[in-house]
Image: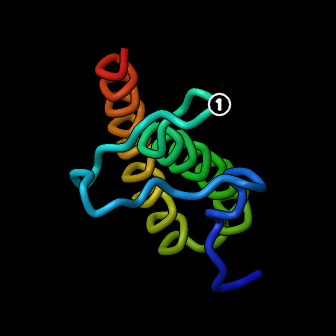
């Protein structure tokens, strides 16, 4: 539903690790072996990738409008850059988690 968080997809009985004593950005591993930060990065990467796929479809729809095509191309370039950054960040977080 619109306006609702997707956090509910984490698991039926699972909650975010939130405690006053933890440093922001640090999280302990979940019972299934993935900490919140890693999960979040994987989720963002997945959603960005889906968005890039959709932009390809929108580009085909906009083939008659150069202004819209240019806009979509700029958005795709930005998203591709962000996907690369996310991938590199995820690799670093996973490397540090060992």
In the shown orientation, is residue 61 left or right of residue 31?
A: right
Residue holding disc 1: 32
Element under disc 1: loop
Q: Nearer the viewer, residue 18 or 47?
A: 18
Residue 65, quarter of picture: bottom right
Residue 32, quarter of picture: top right
Q: Nearer the viewer, residue 28 or 85?
A: 28
Q: Nearer the viewer, residue 10 or 90?
A: 10
Q: Please, which colouring scheme is shown?
A: rainbow
Image coords of residue 15 (percent x, y): 59, 58
Image coords of residue 54 (percent x, y): 69, 56
Image coords of residue 67 (percent x, y): 48, 74
Q: Residues within 10 Å of mark 1 (few under 14, many from 20)?
A: few
Q: Residue at x 78, y 55 (%)?
A: 12
Image coords of residue 97 (percent x, y): 35, 22
In the shown orientation, is residue 61 left or right of residue 78?
A: right
The image quadrant where one finds the C terminus is top left
In the shown orientation, is residue 36 left or right of residue 19?
A: right
**Total numbered labels:** 1
Q: Residue at x 77, y 81 (%)?
A: 1
Q: Residue at x 69, y 64 (%)?
A: 8
């Amino acid at each position: 539903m619109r306006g609702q968080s997707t956090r509910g997809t984490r698991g039926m009985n699972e909650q975010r690790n939130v405690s006053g004593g933890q440093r922001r950005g640090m999280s302990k591993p979940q019972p299934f072996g993935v900490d919140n930060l890693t999960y979040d990065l994987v989720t963002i990467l997945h959603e960005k990738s889906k968005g890039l796929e959709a932009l390809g479809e929108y580009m085909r729809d906009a083939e008659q409008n150069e202004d819209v095509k240019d806009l979509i191309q700029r958005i795709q370039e930005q998203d591709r850059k962000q996907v690369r950054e996310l991938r590199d960040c995820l690799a670093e977080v996973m490397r540090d988690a060992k």
